[in-house]
């Protein structure tokens, strides 16, 4: 019985943590032109408080950041981008959608 309660509690806590994350998509100015630009953003933004994941897309000129809204805000992430020389505009800011499990 204790084992089932523990498993249920762990699953619940894991689910709460993932569902509380948010994903913001930013467009940087100046634009990213190369792998070096992408690496600069990724290597610096990963140290910002609350950041869980940073992805870049040169073609779309998007920086996608998964973050914990309890530890960071869109404004603080934009300030982090400003520190490394990029002004940003918000394309979207949404809750992280749970991944669908493959069966």
Image (tube, grey):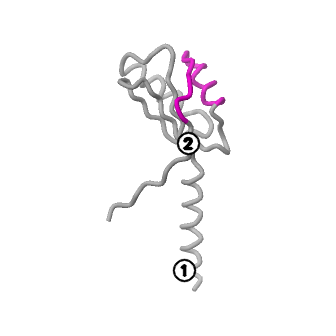
Please give the name of the residue rendered at 54% of the width and 67% of the height, measured from the top-left corner.
11
Question: Dot 1 lies on which element?
Answer: helix
| Residue 103, placed above or below residue 25 | below
On the image, numbered disc 2 is attached to which residue? Answer: 94
Residue with the most extreme front position? 91
Report if the CB atoms under discs 1 and 2 are less than 8 Å apart: no
Q: Position of residue 65 (x, y in %)?
A: 51, 36
| Residue 41, placed above or below residue 98 | above
Q: Position of residue 35 (x, y in %)?
A: 36, 22
**Magenta stretch holds residue 84:** yes
The CA span between labels 1 and 2 is 33 Å
Q: How many marks?
A: 2
Residue with the most extreme left position? 103
Pick the front one: 4 or 89? 89
Q: Quadrant of the N terminus?
A: bottom right
Please give the name of the residue rendered at 65% of the width and 36% of the height, measured from the top-left corner.
73
Is residue 71 toward the left or the right of residue 64 in the image?
Answer: right
Q: Magenta region: which residues?
A: 75-92
**Magenta stretch holds residue 90:** yes
Residue with the most extreme bottom position? 1
- Residue 4 has which mark? 1
Q: Residues within 10 Å of mark 2 (few under 14, many from 20)?
A: few
Between discs 1 and 2, the one toward the N terminus: 1
Q: Quadrant of the C terminus?
A: bottom left
Q: Residues within 10 Å of mark 1 (few under 14, many from 20)?
A: few
Q: Position of residue 34 (x, y in %)?
A: 36, 18
| Residue 28, placed above or below residue 50 | above
Please give the name of the residue rendered at 48% of the width and 35% of the height, measured from the top-left corner.
54
Q: Nearer the viewer, mark 1 or mark 2?
A: 2
Please give the name of the residue rendered at 59% of the width and 82% of the height, measured from the top-left corner.
2
Question: Dot 2 lies on which element?
Answer: strand
């Amino acid at each position: 019985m204790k084992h089932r309660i523990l498993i249920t509690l762990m699953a619940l806590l894991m689910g709460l943590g993932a569902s509380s994350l948010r994903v913001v998509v930013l467009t940087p100015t100046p634009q990213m032109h190369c792998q070096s630009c992408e690496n600069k953003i990724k290597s610096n933004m990963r140290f910002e408080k609350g950041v869980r994941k940073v992805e870049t897309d040169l073609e779309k000129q998007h920086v996608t950041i998964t973050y914990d809204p309890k530890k960071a805000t869109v404004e603080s992430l934009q300030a982090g981008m400003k520190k490394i020389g990029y002004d940003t505009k918000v394309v979207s800011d949404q809750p992280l959608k749970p991944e669908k499990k493959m069966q």
